[in-house]
Image (cartoon, rainbow, N blue to C red):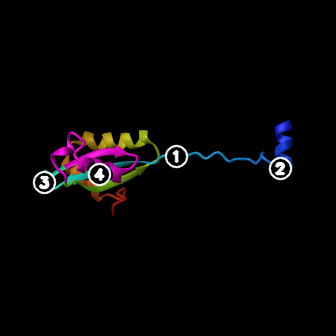
Amino acid sequence: MVERLLWEQDVACSNRVTPTIFKQVHYVYIIYSAKLDRYYIGESEDSETRLDFHNGGFQRYSKRACDWELVFKGQHASRTEAQKVERKIKSSKSRKTVKRWISGADNLMQ
């Protein structure tokens, strides 16, 4: 009751602070290496930084090449959702399916 009265009176040092909720967006990404002629599928909060990580040789699978380029980026509201899509793409185990994702409407790179 006292707090509410202070808010209503706009007393100094009692200004309302609106809590900020940061919703972290996650991305599913596909990178391609011409040297290896391979695709790599992953999930990250920041796909560009992750690409630098792959090209820097810090990832076991991708360190065999340093010419990885981002060919697909799909945005998702949560990490869980992004991981589901990542698993869906990986589970297809088909280069044709990966290419379909790259040319699809969900690709932010187009």
**Distance between the alpha carbons at the discs numbered 1 and 2:** 30 Å
Q: Secondary structure at mark 3?
A: loop
Tell me which residue sits at (42%, 38%) in the image: 80
- Labels 2 and 3 touching (C-beta < 8 A): no
Q: Earlier in the sequence, mark 1 or mark 4?
A: 1
Q: Amino acid at mark 2?
A: Asp
Q: Earlier in the sequence, mark 1 or mark 3?
A: 1
Q: Position of residue 67 (x, y in %)?
A: 19, 55
Could you tell me which quadrant the N terminus lies in?
Answer: top right
Q: Is residue 24 left or right of residue 1?
A: left
Between circles 1 and 2, the one closer to the viewer is: 2
Q: Secondary structure at mark 4?
A: helix
Q: Which residue is mark 2?
A: 10
Q: Nearer the viewer, residue 32 or 88?
A: 32
Query: Few, some or many C-alpha atoms within 10 Å of disc 2 (few <14, some 14-19, many ≥20)?
Result: few
Query: Few, some or many C-alpha atoms within 10 Å of disc 1 (few <14, some 14-19, many ≥20)?
Result: few
Q: Earlier in the sequence, mark 1 or mark 2?
A: 2
Q: Earlier in the sequence, mark 2 or mark 4?
A: 2
Between circles 2 and 3, the one closer to the viewer is: 2
Q: Nearer the viewer, residue 103 or 50?
A: 50
Tell me which residue sits at (26%, 39%) in the image: 91
Q: Which residue is mark 3?
A: 35
Q: Which residues are magenta?
A: 39-66
Q: Amino acid at mark 4?
A: Asp
- Labels 2 and 4 touching (C-beta < 8 A): no
Query: Few, some or many C-alpha atoms within 10 Å of disc 3 (few <14, some 14-19, many ≥20)?
Result: few
Residue 53 highlighted magenta (yes or no): yes
Q: Which residue is mark 1?
A: 23
Q: Amino acid at mark 3?
A: Lys
Q: Secondary structure at mark 2?
A: loop
Q: Which residue is mark 4?
A: 52
